[in-house]
Image: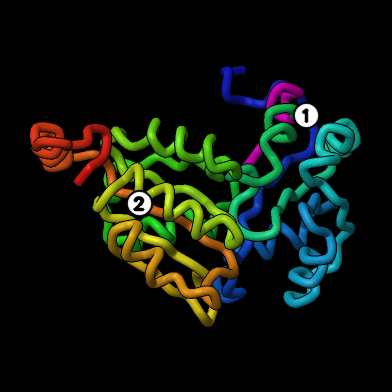
Amino acid sequence: MTPNEPSRAGGTLHLVATPIGNLEDVTRRALRVLGEADLVAAEDTRRTRRLLEHFGISVPVTSLFEHNERAKIPGLLRQLAEGRSVALVTDAGSPGVADPGYPLVRAAIEAGFRVESVPGPSAVIAALQVSGLPTDAFTFVGYLPPKGGARRRRLAELSRRRETIVAFESPHRIAACLADLEDVWGERPVALARELTKAFEEVLRGSAREVRAALTAEKRRGEMVLVLSGWTRRDESAERDAAARPGGRAGRSA
């Protein structure tokens, strides 16, 4: 047995990516795995049942979300121990990526069960692709802190990273977040992708100030992904020049 192989017989935990908006994005493999599963563990059972019904799939569904995940893990491990196939899904996208799933995955691996990815739609990758910002290196940081002070500190920590930064943000915080970005990121390029793969998909590009100005009240709804440009030599030079001017302000890219 190698360190990467399961240490015991049993079922398989399948991590199944589901559409982030457009149902046509579901993969054939995802439909097969969901149809063959003995049990589907879902972040939102009602939403998942609607998805399964749309594709004519009838399997038992149980809930697994942030506030019951720890309590549900032992029962799901028993299902795996009895040789059953368990499919894990979240509301949209890939399980465990800024969504419930990691504790179950970790527990299944530690218990020696097989864990397989069924890849598919990803808001992180979709937003990065359409952002117009460098894609050769990036870091996904999940959701930014909800409170202003903590959020500004986090943005300041990220502001000198060389790679592109991808983050999720909620519609009711996006205006405040962009204002913080304007202060910390200055005129560096950012992109805001909203309602990806849906009928009203839109990508706003420019500085944080420009994006905030374009984000009217009716656009502050739906899923949102921020893509932020990394720190460049040009930014370093601009900051040095700004700091050298009388009354110049260091710590912000110009």
Q: Secondary structure at mark 2?
A: helix
In the rendered image, residue 109 lying in the magenta stretch gets the answer yes
Looking at this view, is 211 or 92 the one in front?
Answer: 211
Q: Which residues are magenta?
A: 108-116
Give amino acid for label 1: Ala
Is residue 48 part of the magenta span, yes or no?
no
The foreground one among 110 and 232 is 232
Q: Position of residue 198 (x, y in %)?
A: 54, 76
The circle drawn on residue 9 is 1
Q: Residue at x 72, y 32 (%)?
A: 103
Q: Nearer the viewer, residue 236 or 179?
A: 179
Q: With respect to residue 73, does 204 lie above or below?
A: below
Give me the residue at 48% from left, 57% from top. Answer: 225
**Spot occupied by residue 249 in the image (x, y as percentages of width and height):** 22, 36
Query: Is 182 left or right of 26, judged from the image as shown?
Result: left
| First-in-chain label (1 vs 2) | 1
Name the residue carrying label 2: 182
**Residue 178 numbered mark, or none:** none
Counting other residues with Cα less than 10 Å from the Cα at mark 2, is it few (<14), some (14-19), or many (20 or more)? many
Query: What amino acid does circle 2 point to?
Result: Glu
Is 73 located above or below residue 253 in the figure? above
* Residue at figure coordinates x 83%, y 32% from the top left: 70
Q: Quadrant of the N terminus?
A: top right
* Percent coordinates x, y for residue 125 in the rendering: 43, 55
